[in-house]
Amino acid sequence: MHHVQQLINGQFVQSNTDEWIDITDPATQEVIAKVPQTTNDEINQAVAAAQTAFETWRKTPITTRARIFLTYQALIREHMDELAEILTAEQGKTIADARGDVFRGLEVVEHAAGIANLQIGDFVENVASGVDTYSIWQPLGVCAGITPFNFPAMIPLWMFPMAIATGNTFILKPSEQDPMVTMRLVELAIEAGVPEGVLNVVHGGKATVDAICDHPDIKAVSFVGSTNVGKHVYERASQSGKRAQCMMGAKNHGVILPDANKEQTLNQLAGAAFGAAGQRCMALSVVVLVGAAGEWIDEIKAKAESLVVSAGKNDKDLGPLISPAAKARVEHLIGTGVEEGASLLLDGRGITVEGFENGNFVGPTIFDNVTSDMQIYKEEIFGPVLCIMRADSLDEAIALLNANPHGNGTAIFTQSGAAAHKFQQDIQVGQIGINLPIPVPLPMFSFSGSRGSKLGDLGPYGKQAVQFYTQTKTVTARWFDDEASRGVNTTISI
Ligand code: NAD
């Protein structure tokens, strides 16, 4: 049995804990490895190593730091197939989707390799006679990242490359449900030249997360996961004086106007609602059909029925959910939708997949006539379940979306520039797609979920991550070019 290791001070070490968590293949329930609940002593060792390493790392030339990420991106590319296979085995998504998961993280690594262009301060000459002011962006110290199960490659790569490139040292706590691809990425980071103590990994669940939030030597915490846990992390980390950012749950709506390109729109909707078995924070889990688009129901159902559910390694359309508990929860919510009076057009409960009879499979599921008071609308289902709603006008659709507390992502499908512009201007959601269903920005921007989907001002990668992981220092300097005394001045001036 493989026991997942920790990384402490440059060494991959087995935990001394007696508490081990099973990692299972979601398509079979086979236990494929065990991950430790890292002990408090081990967490303290990891933070101490990161604290020591920070003293050297923060003064390491920015170009030296950047070059590590040039090597790292090449190593990730070289190991893409292996990484995707590990990811699929423990997480369940299709191989093609697993490659996408790694690739979207790789793009952040590429961006981190350009850190010298990003971590540039400001300079103003002669703010007063002979006086210059400039700002420098200095690393904070030991930072930490806590990641969810659904993107075990991309989300860790949102965090530690930018934190380390900006001169911090890092403690990573991967999801205990699928930490193996994260660990392989960490091994490659060490191979690329990340020095000892600069990156450390601890494991476990709530106990580890709480220890990270409380640790006095950790300066900042980046979290991605569910809303309840995110609120807890934000509160607890802030209370102990840390900078915190939490990317949390979602309920993303797609708005379809009747002038949209029908075939393209329906394909994109099906991919975004059911892909990764709906386990994406940017999944389109609600569609609002405006006016005559309300007649497209049969075609939406047909697209969903055309999707094939199978083990991720078979690389069909949808893999299993992460765990039996996740499957039970999604099936329970589908039952709730029926009880609440929504029309169940397609029921994905109880499906079996030949050769994988024990897998956590739920097939594409569609509810029509969903209303905003129903639990299936209010709760993030995080499964392949699409809720259909109607609106008479774009204004009505916008009002519906703005009344929903979440603000992660949304998309509009239309051929009208004017409608798209109105939507972009009036919608209170941080990431908008126009004829594009999952608008996750590339790293030259930042992930910008908003309202109930986020706590903290700054995003986890891109320009905002450089700000998150640095402290601005502003220096005002005068160098006298003569010995003449100007006397004492007691007024506020320079
Ligand atoms: P989760 O909140 O259960 O777990 C996230 C992390 O928190 C894990 O590392 C886990 O070990 C830890 N954790 C779990 N329970 C905890 C507790 N009670 N106290 C302290 N720590 C705890 O989330 P998940 O199920 O792994 O991921 C799915 C969720 O993440 C969904 O809600 C999804 O929308 C969200 N998500 C959001 C984004 C985003 O960018 N907004 C991206 C991906 C996933």
Image (spheres, grey):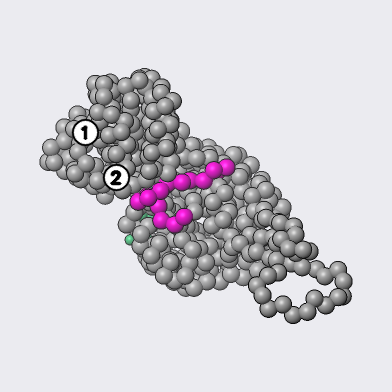
SS state under label 1? strand
Residue 217 image offset from top left, x and y in percent: 52, 71
Magenta-colored segment: predominant secondary structure: loop
- Position above or below: 248 against 475: above
Give the residue at x 66% y 56%.
121
Could you say which disc has been placed on residue 367 in the image? 1
Q: Are marks 2 and 1 in contact (CB under 8 Å)?
A: no
- Position above or below: 150 against 356: below
Residue 313 image offset from top left, x and y in percent: 41, 35
- In this rendered view, identify the residue nearer to me: 208 or 450: 450
- The magenta stretch is 443-457
Image-based side of 461 in relation to 277, left or right? right
- In this rendered view, identify the residue nearer to me: 184 or 231: 231
Quarter where residue 388 is shown: top left
Give the residue at x 24% y 30%.
390
- In this rendered view, identify the residue nearer to me: 383 or 353: 383
